[in-house]
Image (cartoon, rainbow, N blue to C red):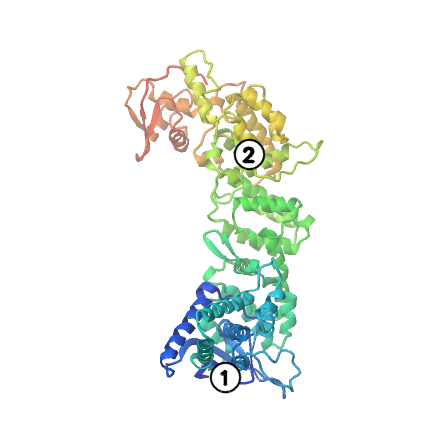
């Protein structure tokens, strides 16, 4: 290894080509971080040079070059191991200054001097690209050729497409042309301009210095490349993977350029380098894909910081490198489908949109396997089972913290099994009994829909997905299949603020209290929610039911809004919750069977609202005959206002609803924390949780 400080005249003055390997990343330097500071440095050196022509050269960083065997008579060449961004920028800078000085009409000697630093002269070479001092990677070659050979800015502009995103190398050229023009305008007479141009050319040739590290025959270019990155060179994991793959290809004497064109070139787009969010991470799409691909192929967790080192071990163990690259390219297209870059209009497209709503990327390795191994018809039962499992768990607000481990176990089952993927996925999910993995049953969904304030618990996006799924199931098939192409608003049928147009018509004070309690308890449940356009939503606002129902029937085409009762209150909300339960379990079915699991109601510590518990003629009759709220009220009966009881003491009470210690503490705690027990208030922060009697006891509560 030989390291020497060289001026730009020494680096570019001899006839040789510095070739950037086709597998290195494209040009990525930017104006703010790189071009502007470079021009500022040149201006500072130029100012110092004007006062002292013996000023020391300005250090521009280091480049690493490796040997390349070239045929006899061909242009001598070196491979750029590190420093391609710097070398490419300097060549474009020299070309921009060369062309700008030519346009200013200064002495030809300045243009010729810079021309010798930007073009090789070898009449015996048959290579049309041998004239270039630096030859960049494939994706940058066309714009580089343009700016280096055009000869003037007008020609560059003429051959640059309008409207589309301009190539970065064209932007570099324009920037330096603009800076030279602005610099020249500050000069006065022709003599001053000539003197200044003389100084600028001399500074560019002799006062800018690089440390050039030439590798010897025994030096490993790949190891040095990775070591430079470890010391802080801003390379992405995908850049290192790309370099590794094509270094392996060259070591194995494979046709690297063909492999690049056939398999890697599709990854060389801005879209693949744009950042996406996955969980708490924000990283380039290509890095995210390589991580998911490696997880899928190795069927094991891959720590993000170890992505490249893990991939290096994996790739080095593969004998058929071309098959690996072909597999990467094929699954890259699949990843674009999964991540939404390409979104099919089929039922699978709807599945993937719903997956976006759940916002979990840990299922991606499973999807890569399913999409890569089976046709659409064969894989659909597996996707349908996954969708049902994920959506049901989302609705029941079950944890996702162990999904990564569970889904890797599922992936392992899929890779080993010989049966249909739908059967493998369904059987695997049905066997899960832990809280972190079980597949909620229809009764669990019903309990949630009847009791839980989903409007408060879910994001609008998730709640909208549930309602849209219910609407899809409610469509009879006799009419056209409705596709919604806009984001609909979530509307409360019984308004959140209902007092103005929804009077309570009760026979006595107790009835008034309970009716108000029922409305407040049910207004955020699914049975009271629907979807409307953003224009219709404010038009209905808090209006009475007669107007609201008429507007919905007149303007809405959703099946969700067709079956609305002529009167609306708690009973109708409960009835609609049951109807939407049926729609939900139709859209997201769960096969019968599986291991015994606790109910979601028990795990949430929830109980179906007492207003559906006692009246046998109401929609809730038969689901549960006992009331948690009434049990709490009776536990305090006969005790003075201000009495405090713990949850354990409330559970130990014998009431008309539950025997002593028969009710679960979770159900009592949940109801107390809901603040919907008349006359009773939970004491926040108490441990164990306790409640205080704050009002006169209600002698009779009949519903």
Q: Which is more toward the observer, 553 or 388?
A: 553
340 up-or-down from 538: above or below? below
Pointer 1 residue = 218
194 up-or-down from 699: above or below? below
Residue 426 makes an appearance in the image: no
The local secondary structure at tag 2 comes to loop
Q: Which is more toward the observer, 353 or 317?
A: 353
Q: Which is more toward the observer, 567 or 395?
A: 567
Q: Which is more toward the observer, 6 or 152?
A: 152
Among all residues in the image, which is located at the extreme top?
A: 507
Q: Which residue is drawn at 54% across and 74% down?
A: 95
How many neighbours does mark 2 have within 10 angstroms: few (below 14), some (14-19), or many (20 or more)? some
Total numbered labels: 2
How many neighbours does mark 1 have within 10 angstroms: few (below 14), some (14-19), or many (20 or more)? few
Q: Could you tell me residue 127's position as x and y percent? A: 65, 80
Q: Residue at x 65, y 44 (%)?
A: 347
Q: Could you tell me residue 288's position as x and y percent? A: 52, 58
Q: Quadrant of residue 211?
A: bottom left
Q: Nearer the viewer, mark 2 or mark 1?
A: 2
Pointer 2 residue = 534
Q: In this view, does 481 lie to the left or right of 213?
A: right
Q: Could you tell me residue 48's position as x and y percent? A: 37, 77
Q: Earlier in the sequence, mark 2 or mark 1?
A: 1
């Amino acid at each position: 290894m030989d390291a020497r400080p060289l001026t730009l005249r020494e680096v570019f003055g001899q006839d040789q080509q510095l070739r950037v390997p086709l597998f290195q990343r494209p040009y990525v330097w930017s104006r703010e971080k790189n071009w502007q500071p470079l021009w500022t440095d040149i201006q500072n050196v130029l100012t110092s040079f004007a006062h002292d022509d013996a000023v020391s050269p300005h250090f521009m960083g280091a480049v690493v070059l490796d040997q390349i065997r070239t045929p006899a008579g061909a242009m001598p060449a070196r491979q750029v191991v590190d420093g391609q961004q710097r070398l490419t920028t300097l060549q474009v800078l020299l070309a921009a200054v060369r062309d700008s000085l030519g346009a200013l009409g200064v002495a030809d000697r300045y243009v010729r001097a810079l021309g010798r630093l930007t073009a090789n002269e070898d009449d015996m070479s048959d290579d049309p690209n041998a004239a270039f001092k630096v030859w960049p990677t494939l994706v940058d070659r066309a714009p580089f050729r343009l700016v280096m050979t055009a000869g003037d800015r007008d020609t560059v502009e003429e051959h640059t497409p309008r409207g589309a995103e301009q190539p970065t190398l064209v932007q570099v050229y324009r920037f330096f042309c603009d800076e030279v023009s602005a610099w020249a305008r500050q000069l006065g007479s022709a003599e001053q301009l000539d003197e200044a141009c003389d100084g600028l050319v001399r500074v560019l040739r002799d006062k800018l210095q690089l440390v050039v590290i030439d590798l010897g025959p025994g030096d490993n270019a790949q190891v040095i490349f990775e070591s430079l990155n470890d010391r802080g060179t801003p390379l992405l994991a995908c850049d290192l993977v790309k370099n590794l793959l094509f270094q392996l290809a060259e070591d194995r004497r494979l046709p690297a350029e063909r492999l690049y064109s056939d398999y890697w070139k599709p990854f060389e787009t801005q879209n693949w380098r744009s950042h996406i969010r996955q969980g708490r991470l924000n990283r380039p799409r290509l890095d995210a894909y390589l991580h998911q691909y490696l997880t899928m192929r190795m069927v094991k967790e891959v720590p993000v910081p170890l992505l490249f080192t893990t991939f290096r071990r994996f790739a080095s163990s593969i004998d058929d490198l071309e098959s690996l690259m072909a597999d990467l390219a094929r699954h890259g297209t699949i990843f674009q489908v999964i991540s939404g870059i390409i979104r099919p209009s089929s039922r699978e497209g709807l599945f993937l949109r719903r997956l976006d709503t759940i916002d979990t990327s840990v299922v991606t390795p499973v999807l890569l396997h399913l999409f890569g191994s089976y046709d659409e018809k064969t894989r659909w039962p597996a996707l349908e089972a996954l969708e049902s499992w994920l959506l049901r768990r989302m609705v029941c607000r079950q944890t996702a913290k162990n999904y990564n481990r569970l889904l890797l176990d599922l992936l392992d089952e899929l890779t080993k099994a010989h049966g249909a993927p739908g059967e493998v996925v369904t059987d695997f999910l049905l066997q899960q009994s832990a809280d972190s993995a079980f597949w909620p049953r229809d009764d669990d969904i019903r309990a949630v829909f009847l009791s839980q304030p989903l409007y408060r618990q879910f994001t609008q996006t998730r709640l909208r997905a549930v309602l849209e799924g219910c609407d899809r199931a409610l469509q009879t098939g006799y009419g056209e299949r409705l596709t919604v192409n806009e984001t609909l608003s979530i509307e409360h049928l019984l308004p959140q603020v209902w007092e103005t147009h929804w009077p309570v018509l009760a026979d006595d004070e107790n009835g008034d209290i309970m009716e108000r309690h029922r409305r407040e308890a049910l207004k955020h449940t699914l049975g009271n929610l629907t979807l409307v356009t953003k224009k219709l939503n404010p038009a209905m606002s808090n209006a009475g039911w007669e107007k609201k129902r008429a507007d919905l029937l007149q303007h809405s085409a959703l099946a969700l809004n067709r079956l609305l009762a002529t009167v609306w209150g708690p009973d109708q909300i409960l009835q609609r919750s049951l109807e939407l339960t049926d729609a939900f379990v139709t859209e997201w079915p769960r096969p019968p069977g599986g291991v015994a699991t606790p109910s979601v109601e028990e795990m949430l510590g929830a109980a179906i609202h007492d207003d559906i518990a006692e009246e046998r003629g109401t929609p809730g009759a038969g689901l549960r005959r006992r009331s948690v709220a009434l049990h709490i009220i009776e536990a305090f009966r006969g005790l003075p206002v201000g009495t405090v009881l713990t949850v354990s003491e409330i559970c130990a009470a014998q009431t008309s609803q539950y025997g002593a210690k028969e009710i679960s503490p979770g159900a009592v705690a949940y109801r107390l924390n809901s603040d919907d027990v008349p006359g009773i208030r939970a004491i926040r922060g108490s441990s164990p949780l306790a409640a205080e009697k704050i009002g006169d006891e209600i002698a009779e509560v009949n519903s």
